[in-house]
Image (cartoon, rainbow, N blue to C red):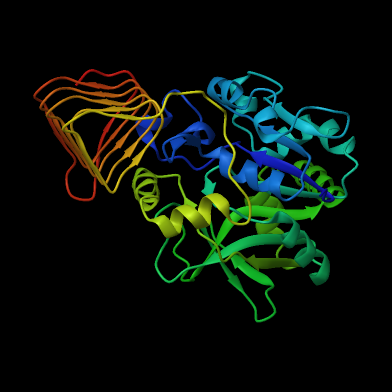
Amino acid sequence: MKTNLLGVINLIHENDELEHLTQSRCLATVPFGARYRLIDFVLSSMVNSGISKVGVFAHKKYRSLMDHMGSGKNWDLQQHRHSGLFILPPATDDIQELSRGDLYHFYQHRDFFNRSPHDYVVITRSYMVCNIDFDAVLRFHQQKGADITVVCKQHDQPLSGKTRKVRMEGDGRIYAMQDHYGRMISDVSSMEMYVMRRDKLMELVETSLAQGQDHLVRHAIFSRLHELKVYGYYYDGYLGAVNTLSSFYTHNRNLLRSDVWRELFYQPGPIFTKVKDEPPARYEAGSKVTGSLVANGCRIEGTVVNSVLFRGVHVERGAVVQDSIIMQNGRIGRDSYVYNSILDKDVCVEAGRDIRGVGTSPYVAGKKKII
């Protein structure tokens, strides 16, 4: 199945409050769910929707992005003339140019858009953890005769990540939007996914830049709500806006619920990631694991409770890991206790240590630390 959509994953100036977890990597490649990266969810949704050409607009700290994405073969996106995965880094390393908005960077790579045979484009962020059918969004967009369609989520409780609130009229037309830190009262949030005609996007790029404006949402859409037909499409599946530490912790631990796991990873299609061959997890005599997500390559000698363990984690004898997230190749020393914590990859907890987060604030350790 092919769709008339060009995919764009926009990493430029993503709203990032993950602190230690993004010191040496971009938000898109933050590990999630024991074996995935954040970008895997939106990219897999594009592939499952029949999108055959995807451009990833990289910005800063994108070495890990290049390593993870490779040629795109794990998502069946090997490059051909009008298909494939294209990582588009900034056209310059000048600090002032890097600080400019996404429209400027779209313009620098305008050949990517102009050479595409697709009539429509979907522009997304990397940190929206969901499983969505973009072809259904395109059909809604065409039925409404919209200039721009914004994918939205209606929620009873505030989302734990940073999102833009929107307000709609009865027919679904959006008449107000706010930035991430505004105080608009609304139970509808934008998922930062925008569908429009490719020529309309290039028109907005050129018009906005000519007026000294260079941000897609803040300038090209906010300021034109009165003249553009902007409609909201309601997404009714699981959503995690993972751009803060609290949302990262919350949505990782939500995966311990089987209903969330099944909905997120299999409906409407599977989530793909970079393949790494690892042996099965090994549970030694005397180990105890309850309510946890444990990836391949782990070795468990101690106790793991309500936690997420990434590939290659070693929990030594007598150690207890509870309500925590331990990333790749972490080691928890003998008789140590780790509670309410997030440990980045290659973190080593020495024997006999007691590591605890406080209240709703988990303890966080950056990469390759010995604690």
Query: For this rendering, which residue is in front, 279 or 145?
Result: 279
Image location (x, y in percent) of residue 368? 32, 18
Quarter of image, res 352: top left
Residue 251 visible to an observer of this rendering:
yes
Q: Quadrant of residue 311?
A: top left
Q: Residue at x 40, y 50 (%)?
A: 255
- Give x and y (percent) for residue 216: 68, 47
Q: Is residue 226 above or below residue 363?
A: below
Q: Which part of the image, by quadrant, shows the C terminus?
A: top left
Residue 149 x, y percent position in the rendering: 72, 61
Q: Horizontal placement of 70 versus 285: left or right?
A: right
How many numbered marks does the figure carry?
0
Residue 67, picture quadrant: top right
Can you name the residue that lies furthest to the front here?
A: 285
Q: Give the left or right position of residue 316, taking residue 134 as reference.
A: left
Q: Is residue 33 above or below residue 314?
A: below
Q: Is residue 246 above or below residue 12?
A: below
Q: Is residue 180 visible?
A: no
Residue at position x 74%, y 29% from top? 86
Left or right of 290 on screen, residue 4: right
Where residue 32 sits: x, y (%)?
44, 39
